[in-house]
Image: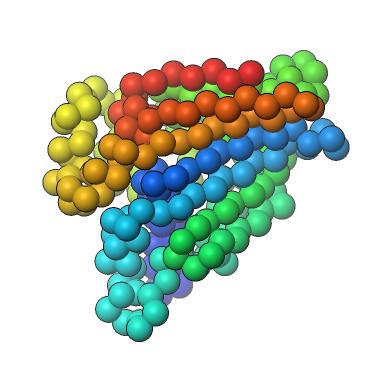
Amino acid sequence: MKTKNVILVSIFSVLLFLLCSCKTELKISVLPSGKIAVEYYAVPGKSFSETILAISGEEAFSDEPIVFNANEIKTSVVQTGLEEIDVSGVKNSTLDIKGIIPTDKSDIFSKSGIIKYGTKANDVEIVISAETLQKFYEFCPEQFQTYIDLFMSPSFTGEEMTTEEYVDLVASVYGQELADEVLTSKLHITLQKNDSKVVKEISLLDLLNNSTSILIK
């Protein structure tokens, strides 16, 4: 039971890291081999770290609490369908997740349409919209869905909510400091193929509150 709880907390840690880090970068690269690499890099804010420590109980039972454990997070990320997964980072300050899209495109990024493919090997696009995010949620393992539900994010639930309403909701559940981090956080999305590199920046709040639609190609 303890092992199961650790895995569940690590899943929540990944999701909170992806959604609430003060610096986040998602990079999709078409490699010379034809493989497609996914990399997610995140730097947590102070409120994020405190929230994870409170949920995991690390702070109460350790003199040197750990916000995330690379091995446990890798176990969780395997459930997304990515291959050749590597998780690294500096203790409690950065997290770097890398993986390769499987050849049968059975991962949740491909099935949801967040990564869209054309007829040529390097014909890859990134689509961030209400439709792809809700499909991403649909294809997530049940445990991931359970923790996504904790955020009550309109982008995943399809619920209509104003920006003010959503920020108030986050503040009421996780505190005003974490809500403020969501307000100021940005997500940088990069698509790299051959010699072409396109970078887009979007507000994390817009992403969570179903207020943006982006096509990168």
x and y percent of residue 102 in the render?
Answer: 72, 40
Query: Left or right: where does residue 193 sit relative to residue 58?
Result: right
Quarter of image, res 127: top right
| Quarter of the rendering occupied by the N terminus | bottom left
Q: Nearer the viewer, residue 94 or 38?
A: 94
Q: Looking at the image, can residue 145 be seen? A: no
Q: Nearer the viewer, residue 74 or 176?
A: 176
Q: Looking at the image, can residue 11 be seen? A: yes
65 lies above or below 213: below
Q: Nearer the viewer, residue 114 or 196?
A: 196
x and y percent of residue 105 in the render?
Answer: 68, 33
The residue at the point 39 percent across, 46 percent down is 22
4 lies above or below 31: below
x and y percent of residue 213 in the render?
Answer: 44, 18
Query: Left or right: where does residue 206 sit relative to residue 110?
Result: left
The residue at the point 62 percent across, 24 percent down is 198
Callout count: 0
x and y percent of residue 7 in the render?
Answer: 46, 64
